[in-house]
Image (tube, rainbow, N blue to C red):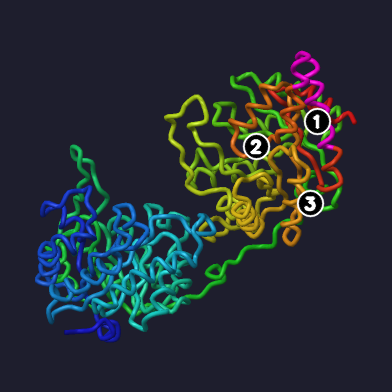
């Protein structure tokens, strides 16, 4: 029986197996079951698939464990069975391989975003992969194959998890789209050297697109690494046939491309989604007649792109200049219109400009309300009124690609100041059935914008001139779980945040407690000030707006004032806001005064101290 070490060392081309899920489905497994668990529940079925691929000519077969990590298994209530499932899968693959093929433990991504674009830490990812690695080692694999990864950081976590427990060979495979790049926009000639630097033994492409796209990727990889290359394309792009997705590439077509892929430099070829033992048998016949081309590694500076230094904060905008200089800042928050007429918004902004405020804050669908978009509203304000904006930008409505497109357009249009927030869930608004995206959260988006300011996209590809965003984030001194809020704030600062705006402040002691705990990593803080207009407004904020804390003493003041009428209540709300404004001025660099219910005159009245 050949070992993976031997296959890697002999300079010959070898055949890997094909799709497991496709075969299990064709043999009657339902789509809604956990295919990894079939190693325990229907071992004969899994073993039969392995044997079919070995009979077809596969010299390297993968365990049925692509999704057998605790994160994915938890969706089926099987996280506690991670070790057992992986061990059983490795033993089944061993039985199926007999003495004719080597066995590699298959490990796929966790199915979640990890830092810097998600909440899960790299160390947590390593722990999850380590549990899967332990089970595969117990089952006796010859090595590991990491497949269908889009994120170089995540595959790095998987590599380290393996290396911490074993010195067995590692094959690291990324997946790409029809544009030839990963979902993060990283091209093969960029991620190839990064994978090699991790200490893996072979690198390649799997799943992704059909064989033509994989061939082009292998041609790129062959110019930047001399490690053995691997390729396992899908059987073409899937087509909708009735209510099913069908892969249409024939065994002969796949085999002809397998030969070209080997000629381009690949040492290991097989199949992924939609491929069967028939495809592998055809590939075996073609591959035996060719030898891998010896590829020449070409090193260029582009492979080591690290980005440029960001434009100095003081040079990005007037707002950024005041932040950098430590000068006091005054902004007012207004909401964009619900319709298509921006005239009232312009009128409000002209009044704010005349009053001398530094910028107007433009929220992005607050409380999941449908309003004119914050980006376009900000552009119109800056062009029509000549007042700088601080544009709120939330993660609720757009995926990573949409955010990147928006931000590049905003930068080209001249917008400079951003306040990055996760966003309120749709259930808070008038369209509770609307779908929320939350592809990344505010920490991930802060990382993304920070990279753009260094001239890099999420995949570390150069974008040309860097963007000039002043990066702000939200923070809540009154958070119920303050420890978690402080942790997230620290991560935002680490990701590149340059200022923070708080939720409305109604309790100075609460603000002081927060400020004392962030002293070591504090960035300029802008305190939120909300003038209450009535008892009903105060009660609404206290009970129905997440993240806002209105203390009982404030509610009591508004209650007593409201008993005297609307005007006394409004006067009391303005007075409370003025008291907060006077108190926070000594503690923070700036204030953001909200215009309650769109009443800019009330915000200006608060500022008339």
Name the foreground residue: 599 vs 219: 599
Label 1: which secondary element: helix
Q: CA distance from mark 1 to mark 2?
A: 15 Å
First in sequence: mark 1 or mark 2?
2
Q: Residue at x 18, y 37 (%)?
A: 242
Residue 176, by quadrant, is bottom left
Q: Which residue, given by chain and number where applicable, does mark 1 sit on?
A: 576
First in sequence: mark 2 or mark 3?
3
* Rendered position, 194 above or below 364: below
| Range shown magenta | 560-581
Label 3: which secondary element: helix
Badge 3 crowding class, 10 Å Cα cut-off, few under 14, some 14 to 19, many 20 or more, is: few
Residue 291 is situated, as x and y percent measured from the top left of the image, at: 24, 78
Residue 554, by quadrant, is top right
Q: Residue furthest top?
A: 565
Badge 1 crowding class, 10 Å Cα cut-off, few under 14, some 14 to 19, many 20 or more, is: many
Q: Which residue, given by chain and number where applicable, does mark 2 sit on?
A: 548
Q: Is residue 465 visible?
A: no
Q: Is residue 60 visible?
A: yes
Q: Is residue 401 magenta?
A: no
Q: Which residue, given by chain and number where applicable, does mark 3 sit on?
A: 315
Badge 2 crowding class, 10 Å Cα cut-off, few under 14, some 14 to 19, many 20 or more, is: many
């Amino acid at each position: 029986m050949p070992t993976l070490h031997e296959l890697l060392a002999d300079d010959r081309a070898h055949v890997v197996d094909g799709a497991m899920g496709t075969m299990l489905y064709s043999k009657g497994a339902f789509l809604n079951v956990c295919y990894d668990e079939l190693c325990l529940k229907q071992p004969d079925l899994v073993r039969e698939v392995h044997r079919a691929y070995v009979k077809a000519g596969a010299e390297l077969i993968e365990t049925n464990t692509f999704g057998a990590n605790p994160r994915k298994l938890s969706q089926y209530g099987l996280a506690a069975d991670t070790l057992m499932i992986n061990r059983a899968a490795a033993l089944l693959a061993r039985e199926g391989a007999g003495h004719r093929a080597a066995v590699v433990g298959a490990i796929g991504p966790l199915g979640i975003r990890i830092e810097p674009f998600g909440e899960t830490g790299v160390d947590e990812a390593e722990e999850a992969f380590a549990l899967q690695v332990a089970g595969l080692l117990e089952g006796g694999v010859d090595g590991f194959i990491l497949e269908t990864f889009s994120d170089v950081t995540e595959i790095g976590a998987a590599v380290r998890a393996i290396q911490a427990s074993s010195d067995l060979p590692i094959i690291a495979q990324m997946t790409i789209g029809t544009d030839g790049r990963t979902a993060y926009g990283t091209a093969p000639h960029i991620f190839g050297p990064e994978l090699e630097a991790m200490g893996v033994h072979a690198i390649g492409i799997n799943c992704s697109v059909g064989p033509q796209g994989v061939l082009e990727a292998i041609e790129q990889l062959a110019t930047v690494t001399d490690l053995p290359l691997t390729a396992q394309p899908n059987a073409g792009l899937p087509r909708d046939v009735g209510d099913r997705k069908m892969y249409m590439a024939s065994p002969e077509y796949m085999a002809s491309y397998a030969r070209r892929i080997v000629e381009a430099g690949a040492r290991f070829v097989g199949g992924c989604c939609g491929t069967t033992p028939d495809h592998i048998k055809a590939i075996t016949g073609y591959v035996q007649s060719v030898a891998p081309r010896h590829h020449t590694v070409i090193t260029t500076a582009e492979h080591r792109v690290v980005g440029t230094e960001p434009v100095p904060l003081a040079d990005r905008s007037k707002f950024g200049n005041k932040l950098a200089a430590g000068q006091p800042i005054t902004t007012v928050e207004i909401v964009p219109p619900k319709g298509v007429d921006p005239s009232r918004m312009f009128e409000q902004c002209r009044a704010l400009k005349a009053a001398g405020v530094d910028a107007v804050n433009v929220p992005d669908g607050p409380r999941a309300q449908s309003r004119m978009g914050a980006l376009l509203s900000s552009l119109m304000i800056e062009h029509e009124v000549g007042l700088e904006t601080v544009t709120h930008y939330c993660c609720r409505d757009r995926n990573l690609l949409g955010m990147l497109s928006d931000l590049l357009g905003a930068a080209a249009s001249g917008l400079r100041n951003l306040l990055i927030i996760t966003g309120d869930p749709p259930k808070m608004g008038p369209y509770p059935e609307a779908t929320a995206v939350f592809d990344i959260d505010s920490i991930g988006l802060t990382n993304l914008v920070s990279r753009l300011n260094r001239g890099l996209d999420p995949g570390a590809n150069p974008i040309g001139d860097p963007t000039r965003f002043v990066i702000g984030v939200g923070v809540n001194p009154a958070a119920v779980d303050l420890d978690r809020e402080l942790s997230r704030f620290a991560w935002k600062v680490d990701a590149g945040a340059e200022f923070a705006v708080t939720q409305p402040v109604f309790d100075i002691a609460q603000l002081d407690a927060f400020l004392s705990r962030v002293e070591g990593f504090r960035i300029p803080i802008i305190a939120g000030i909300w003038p209450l207009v009535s008892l009903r407004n105060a009660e609404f904020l206290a009970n129905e707006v997440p993240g806002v804390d209105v203390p009982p003493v404030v509610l009591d003041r508004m209650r007593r004032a409201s008993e005297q009428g609307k005007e006394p209540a409004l006067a009391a709300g303005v007075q409370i806001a003025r008291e907060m404004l006077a108190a926070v001025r000594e503690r923070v660099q700036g204030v953001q005064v909200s215009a309650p219910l769109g009443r800019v005159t009330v915000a200006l009245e608060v500022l008339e101290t």
